[in-house]
Amino acid sequence: MEKELLKFKPRNLDRLPRLDTILMVEKALYKYKSDKTVTQIWRLLPKKVMWTTFITILDYLEYSGKIIIEDDRTVTWIWDPKKLEEWKKKGLVIA
């Protein structure tokens, strides 16, 4: 059987984020790692972002494997590009 690819499906099609907004949220999430909850990070963003847009970005980042949102709504950054480069140098294949 063929492996079925998962597709990202945003919850709200009215609020699709721009790239600069996604990058701003990524930077904030990386900065706080796992110290803050979803609501706390939203309030600490340098620019205001609508809640639905913010949730769409979090959905995308969780889908892409950069973050994990835990049961207590704490966001944990898990993406490590430096480690990925080390793995590539060792010849490990990332699927």
Image: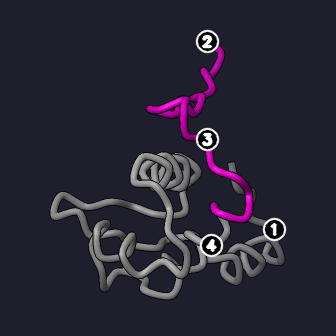
Amino acid at pointer 2: Met
Q: Which residues are magenta?
A: 1-21
Q: What is the CA distance from the residue labelled 3 to the residue labelled 2?
A: 34 Å
Q: Which label lies toward us, 3 or 2?
A: 3
The residue tagged with tag 4: helix, strand or loop? helix
Q: State which tag comes first along the sequence, 4 or 3.
A: 3
* Crowd class of label 3 (few under 14; some 14 to 19; many from 20; radius 10 Å): some
The residue pinned by badge 4 equals 24
Q: State which tag comes first along the sequence, 1 or 3.
A: 3
Q: Which mark is residue 17?
A: none
| Left or right side of 43 for 29 | right
Q: 52 or 93, which lies in front?
A: 52
The residue pinned by badge 2 equals 1
Q: State which tag comes first along the sequence, 2 or 4.
A: 2
Q: State which tag comes first along the sequence, 1 or 2.
A: 2
Q: Which residue is at a point 47% across and 32% down the rendered structure image?
A: 12
The residue pinned by badge 1 equals 91
Residue located farthest toward the top when viewing the structure as drawn: 1
Amino acid at pointer 1: Gly
Q: State which tag comes first along the sequence, 3 or 2.
A: 2
The residue pinned by badge 3 equals 16
Task: Report the number of numbered marks.
Answer: 4
| Left or right side of 71 for 32 | right
Q: Main secondary structure of the magenta part?
A: loop
